[in-house]
């Protein structure tokens, strides 16, 4: 108990302020990404399952080495990919579901943005045994932006695993904080990485697989989630072929390579949308519309139910002529568009790490994650809520219509599932596919 008799009255208030701030900061240290805020909507809470997490290394053999392509000749290489996989797990009695993720700030280690290692905690147990009494679970594949990492959206990946999904987040080679490479690699490889990882996860999930997730995955019930360039990738895998304009641009920037032609809508052999195992798509701030990547013909191929998320001030992917235009052009799919008013591009990542707040840090370390007008923790909770409702509807057959069939403007009336007065600053559009 503090005795105020030993503190000068002039300093007493300052001491109280210090103690309050110290207590508040200690409480903040206990908040982990994805934990619910007091005004979090109903479906943002974690599910019933404790979860495990593991790292898996894959190799996609005989891929085009586009970064070493010369005069239209494409060398071949074996492309390495790292995954992080979350799943419902059996925890030993008395064991806490706690994990430390190793991450970096910066890009490529150059003189302006040196790579700075940091760690953050999550609510999972490393290499825990999967549960054996949960039946087969839907699979979710997650693709980060350029640049990013497999840990960019742990608030969402952990949350979904706790609700009975197997979640695999890809770390896309040439597109991470650690190894950012020229853009042509991301343009070519993003959709191909997603499809390859999906196929590999299905293989590992087969009942006769020797992997620890054997028999755990419902291999005909898959969702794909992408942010920014991840959105660019998942839309293509789901059926939206890229435009001929992108093909011409790619050939020009690679001095002759036509290797991206297999992903164009005009290619009769384009395979996007042919994978009937994919039942739902979530696209956070998908890139490309303002740059001519998508056109009406290409968007005709997207027939899988899709949930778009955007900021109406997005200055990377664009909004009216960008993400919203993709939503409006996706005529042949049931679709939603959740818009955060006054938000820019960062509508998907974790909050900024504590290390990004330290004096002297480049502001880009903060704005790699943060939104200028929104609390990122609130965005995370809202994303957890709506993604749960959408994937639950299309992958689990649950009735979440009351959370999805809402008035367009959240300012007019508190949306279903939100605390009173808490659902301001958003819009939700929805449209039914045209046959």
Image (cartoon, grey):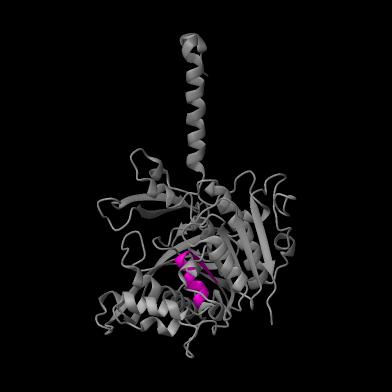
The residue lying at 38 percent from left, 49 percent from top is 365
The magenta stretch spans which residues?
224-236
Which quarter of the figure has residue 307? Answer: bottom right
The residue lying at 41 percent from left, 41 percent from top is 357
- Report the number of discs: 0
Secondary structure mostly seen in the magenta stretch? helix
Q: Position of residue 400 (x, y in %)?
A: 71, 64
Which quarter of the figure has residue 239? Answer: bottom right
The residue lying at 59 percent from left, 60 percent from top is 49
The residue lying at 54 percent from left, 74 percent from top is 216
Q: Is residue 282 above or below residue 61?
A: above
Q: Is residue 430 above or below residue 25?
A: below
The answer to whether residue 52 of the structure is visible from this angle is: yes
Q: Is residue 229 magenta?
A: yes
Q: Position of residue 31 (x, y in %)?
A: 52, 44
Q: Nearer the viewer, residue 350 or 154?
A: 350
Which quarter of the figure has residue 110? Answer: bottom left
Residue 421 in the figure: left or right of residue 271: right
Which quarter of the rendered picture does the C terminus lie within? bottom right
Q: Specify the farthest residue to the bottom.
A: 268
Q: Nearer the viewer, residue 305 or 85?
A: 305
Residue 79 in the figure: left or right of residue 395: left
Q: Is residue 223 magenta?
A: no
């Amino acid at each position: 108990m503090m005795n105020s008799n030993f503190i000068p009255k002039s300093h007493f208030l300052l001491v109280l302020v210090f103690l309050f701030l110290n207590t508040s900061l200690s409480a903040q240290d206990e908040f982990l990404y994805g934990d619910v805020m007091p005004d979090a909507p109903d479906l943002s809470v974690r599910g019933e399952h404790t979860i495990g997490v593991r790292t898996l290394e894959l190799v996609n053999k005989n891929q085009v080495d586009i970064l070493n392509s010369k005069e239209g000749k494409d060398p071949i290489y074996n492309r390495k990919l790292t995954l992080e996989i979350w799943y419902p797990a059996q925890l030993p009695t008395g064991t806490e579901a706690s994990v430390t993720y190793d991450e970096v700030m910066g890009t490529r280690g150059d003189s302006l943005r040196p790579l700075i290692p940091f760690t953050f905690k999550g609510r999972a147990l490393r290499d825990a045994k999967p549960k054996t009494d949960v039946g087969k679970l839907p699979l979710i594949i997650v693709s980060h932006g350029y640049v990013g990492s497999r840990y960019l959206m742990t608030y969402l990946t952990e949350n979904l695993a706790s609700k009975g999904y197997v979640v695999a987040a890809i770390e896309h080679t040439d597109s991470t904080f650690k190894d950012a490479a020229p853009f042509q690699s991301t343009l070519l490889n993003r959709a191909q990485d997603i499809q390859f990882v999906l196929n590999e996860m299905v293989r590992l999930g087969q009942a006769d697989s020797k992997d620890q997730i054997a028999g755990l995955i419902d291999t005909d019930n898959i969702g794909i989630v992408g942010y920014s360039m991840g959105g660019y990738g998942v839309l293509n895998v789901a059926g939206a072929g890229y435009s001929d304009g992108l093909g011409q641009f790619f050939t020009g920037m690679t001095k002759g390579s036509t290797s991206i032609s297999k992903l164009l809508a005009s290619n009769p052999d384009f395979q996007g949308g042919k994978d009937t195992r994919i039942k739902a798509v979530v696209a956070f701030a998908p890139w490309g519309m303002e740059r001519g990547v998508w056109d009406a013909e290409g968007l005709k191929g997207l027939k899988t139910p899709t949930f778009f998320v955007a900021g109406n001030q997005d200055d990377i992917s664009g909004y009216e002529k960008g993400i919203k235009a993709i939503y409006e052009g996706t005529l042949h799919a049931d679709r939603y568009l959740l818009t955060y008013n006054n938000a820019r591009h960062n509508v998907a990542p974790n909050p900024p790490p504590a290390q990004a707040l330290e004096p002297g840090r480049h502001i880009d370390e903060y704005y790699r994650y943060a939104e200028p007008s929104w609390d990122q923790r609130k965005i995370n909770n809202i994303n957890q809520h709506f993604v749960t409702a959408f994937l639950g509807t299309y992958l689990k057959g649950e009735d979440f219509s009351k959370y999805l069939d809402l008035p367009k403007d959240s300012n007019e009336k508190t949306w279903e599932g939100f605390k009173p007065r808490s659902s301001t600053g958003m819009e939700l559009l929805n449209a039914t596919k045209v046959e």
